[in-house]
Amino acid sequence: MIKVDRFRVRLPFDSSVLHRFRDRANAYYELNPTARAQRRLDIDNEWRRIRSSVNDGLFELFHGKCAYCETSLAGGMDVDRFRPISGASDVDGSASVDHYAWLALDWENLYASCAACNRAKRSLFPVKGARAAPLTAYSSVVAQEQAMLIDPCNGEPEHHLAFSPDGSVRALSAEAEVTIRVLNLNRSALRHSRHLVYQSTTNLLSRNGDPAALVADETPYAAVARAAVQAHQEGPYPPSNFLSYAVPEEVRSADVVFATDEEAYRLAARPLRSVSVKNFKMLQEFDLEFPDVADKNAPWLMLLGINASGKSTLLQAVALALAGAAEANRILKPAQALTTGKSKGSITLNFWDSEQPVELHFSRNSQNFSGTQQPSAITLAYGALRHPGARRSGNGHQPLFVSVRSLFKAISYISHPARWLRDANEFQFGVAARALREILPIGDDVEIERRRGTIYFRVGSNALPLSSLSAGYRSVVAVVLDIIHLLLERWQALESATAIVLIDEIDAHLHPRWKMRIVKSLRDAFPFVQFITSTHDPLALRGLRNGEVALLRQDPMKGSVADRNLPPIEGMQVDQLLTSRHFGLESTLDPDTEALFDEYYYLLSQPKLPGAAQRIDELRSRLGDKESLGRNQRENLMLAAAASYLAEERALGLNASPCDLRQ
């Protein structure tokens, strides 16, 4: 991290956008606290308008490098809000949902970041003392608050951070220690890159070379090169100057972090990167790479495949490994997990920005699972048949960080959602209500309130109790509140809360319109929660990004295998998804209509058959009545041309599939 002159690059977008946004921000903060707690300040319209200009300006301002770790951004840049939009959190999990939405578009609050720093930082912004009042101007916020993150634009990074020859960075101040831990600045890949720069600089100096190019602002890891030059001239920092060595969390096992440092457990959470399963039920030799983390938010993975392809089994394997051997022993016997005819098996998980895998081992002769004993992430899992009820499935023991037993029950019951929400404090109620408003397909004028122990959805003078909602609503509400309940045990705001949630058949009980928005809604409400889910419905793929789908299928030699080399899904229509490799249907037509089409195309290719013309007209009329030939005149013209083409192909004896163009 190096000092950056913020005013070296002028405001790269029209200031009128900022003025209009500030007017809306003023109106937002004028809402009564209850109404404001259930809403977010929407920045999407303004952000879409200025995003490209902001990207260009930040790339120039920060010399094409991450503001925090100095990694080159030539391969892609994230935009980080130094002070987050909402849910600004301290390392102990405490948070303020009011901070700092009004600064969301302030040029001085926007920083260039690499994906690794951005996903580690999340909405963390620790301060010592009070936060500035909402709507305070940015310069005054900087002056009033004692931020615990080093600011490359308003601080002196070289006074806080010391770089060592091995590439590690050490803390010279309390702010540096927090910064290193929050941004994960001692991750292995970063340490390696810094080590190479330090070594190159030292070698150059030993040959009396000029290090000017290495220490220039625009050079990646310039701070490391400068540290090497300083050490060459003055000697290294004495160890007594270090406040801490800031041991990287990633080199400690999940068991060690879990047992000794809850704060590190909270900060070190990372999304899953890969899973390898050997001889777990129907998964014999199974490997799956999870999607790359494209931005600061957690990636999703949707599992597709026919029945008995291994989707539920994979979810169970991941859930057990995440929960740890101690909890796995309460759920399942090792012999029940083992593939028939095999003597031993294992599940191995790897995480982004972490060196330590999580392992779970089991064998036929063992009474217990072995390997990583404690949970490696806050984990929740839900089986396909899940219902809100008065009790939770399983026995009375509930581990501190995990709740996965629902996934192993034929029918599971989730704790009644109203029970916890009814007793939550005002802050927690506001956080939960905001999330529900984002997830449920309800209007902006709906308020969620509680009176005399009952939760109501109110529109004007009309109030509907939670217990009167449809089964689909109640099922989703139960799952959402169950997730929120466990997350709020560790965090006060969802904007920084991390977890891994597994849901079998996420589309269960949902109306088609809701299926199309469930992924985006959950993504918005839980930005740093990694969801691994399954579905049989193409509608549930809406909101996923390219690469976030895996197709499970049976291989004669390997058993169940995963295929992520699938066509891009963004922009595909539902019928295109159904007839693509994702679902593998030859046609979306019902069998009777399909038979009529086959006859129709055959007769078009044989117009001289007796009665062909009359039958063609009859079929065209019948298919047209079903709106099968097109939804409008343009589609009818296009399909008529396609029909002629297919008829000609068939007449020439070519083996074209009629459904190719009909789809």
Image (tube, helix red, strand yellow):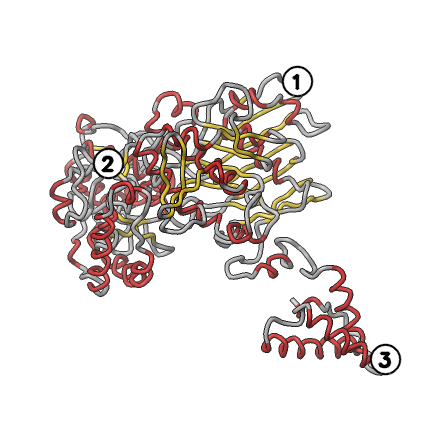
Is residue 273 found left or right of 343 in the rendered image?
left
Please state the horizontal and vertical placement of residue 55, each as a whole percent of the image: 30, 59
Mark 2 or 3, nearer chain start: 2
Instruction: Name the mark nearer the viewer: 2 or 3.
Output: 3
Q: Can you name the residue that lies furthest to the right here?
A: 610
Q: Residue at x 74, y 64 (%)?
A: 594
Instruction: Answer whether residue 577 is visible to the viewer in this image.
Output: yes
When the figure is inspected, residue 656 is found, relative to residue 93, above or below; the finding is below
Question: Quadrant location of residue 134?
Answer: top left
462 shown above or below 579 = above
Q: Element under label 1?
A: loop
Q: If the image is split into quadrants, where does the N terminus sit?
A: top left
Q: Can you identify the residue that label 2 sits on? A: 126
Dot 3 or dot 1, earlier in sequence: 1
Instruction: Identify the disc placed on residue 611.
Output: 3
Amino acid carrying mark 3 in the image = Gly
Give the spatial CA distance, label 3 vs label 1: 74 Å
> Which amino acid, by three-letter code, is at mark 2?
Pro
Residue 283 at x, y percent in the picture: 65, 36
Residue annotated with mark 1? 365
Q: Looking at the image, do the residues carrying marks 1 and 2 touch, with CB atoms under 8 Å apart?
A: no
- Who is closer to the viewer here, 423 or 231? 423
Determine whether the residue tagged by mark 3 lies in a helix, strand or loop: loop
